Amino acid sequence: MIRALFSAASGMTAQQMNVDNIANNLANSNTTGFKARRTQFQDLMYQNVIQPGASASAQTTIPSGLQLGLGTRSSGNEIIFTQGSFAQTENPLDVVIQGNGFFQVHLPTGELAYTRCGSFQLDRNGNLVTADGNTVEPQMTIPSNALSVTIASDGTVSCTLPNQTAASVIGQLQLAGFANPAGLNSLGSNLYAPTEASGEPTVATPGGAEGLGSLLQGYTESSNVSVVTEFINLIVAQRAYEANSKVVKAADDMYSQVNNLTR
């Protein structure tokens, strides 16, 4: 019975973390470029009362054995990088990635971070920056007298200036790709940092042979959180938590009956 108590308690702890993850997904259901996370579970070690394959006699072995598991734990919450829906905006600096890849941005520390959020703006110097003021890499400076800005599908940024008949090319946006994007470290503010699990970034032109997505101007990528799916997951997690709590109560009742035998 003592095993049942601790196993059920581990299940309650795991489901609590699952609910915490679901709550974060729902909280970011309207966050531009947000990617949902999915909680993963692992069973814990087993106590071998009878080892499978042990000798039952000189000629026979035990086919299945008797192993008692000691519960479960949350082993991770993988980032799901499915494409979110596109929302059209009136901002010519909003850009969405159609496919794989991340925009590169400079952090105040000088390091590079990566994001799927293409809601860009201009700072006082005309540099293309994120909502937090982080400069986009490679740096793009839009002239203050630019009449219009065009961002092509391959990342080429050009603008039309007064008294000019042809657009002037300013530069070209680059995208970064990872062998295992689920291994990226979430920094908050829609930013990710590479880890040993994600591998080093591969920087290339959008829509090129490297398999990175193309760009689309005037759109942003909505969160890929499905509110309906998250509510279903919430119900399942709640019922699993409830079931484990009933196991705790059942084990407690069994202990109570044992204690009553001494009276």
Image (spheres, helix red, strand yellow):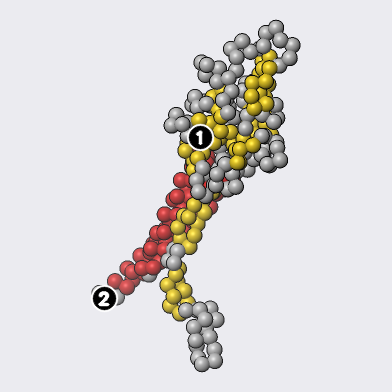
- When asked about the image quadrant of residue 87, the answer is top right
Q: Write down the residue under mark 1.
A: 112
Circle nearer the viewer, 2 or 1: 1
Q: CA distance from mark 2 to mark 1?
A: 68 Å
Which residue type does callout 2 highlight? Thr
Determine whether, in the image, residue 202 is placed left or right of residue 22: right
Q: Write down the residue under mark 2.
A: 262
Give the image location of residue 86, x and y in percent: 66, 32
- Residue 226 in view of the camera: no
Residue 80, placed above or below residue 54? above
- When asked about the image quadrant of residue 203, the answer is top right
Farthest residue, direction right: 165
Most foreground residue, 61 or 15: 61
Farthest residue, direction left: 263
Sequence-first tag of 2 and 1: 1
Q: Residue at x 48, y 55 (%)?
A: 75
Determine whether, in the image, residue 10 is placed left or right of residue 221: left
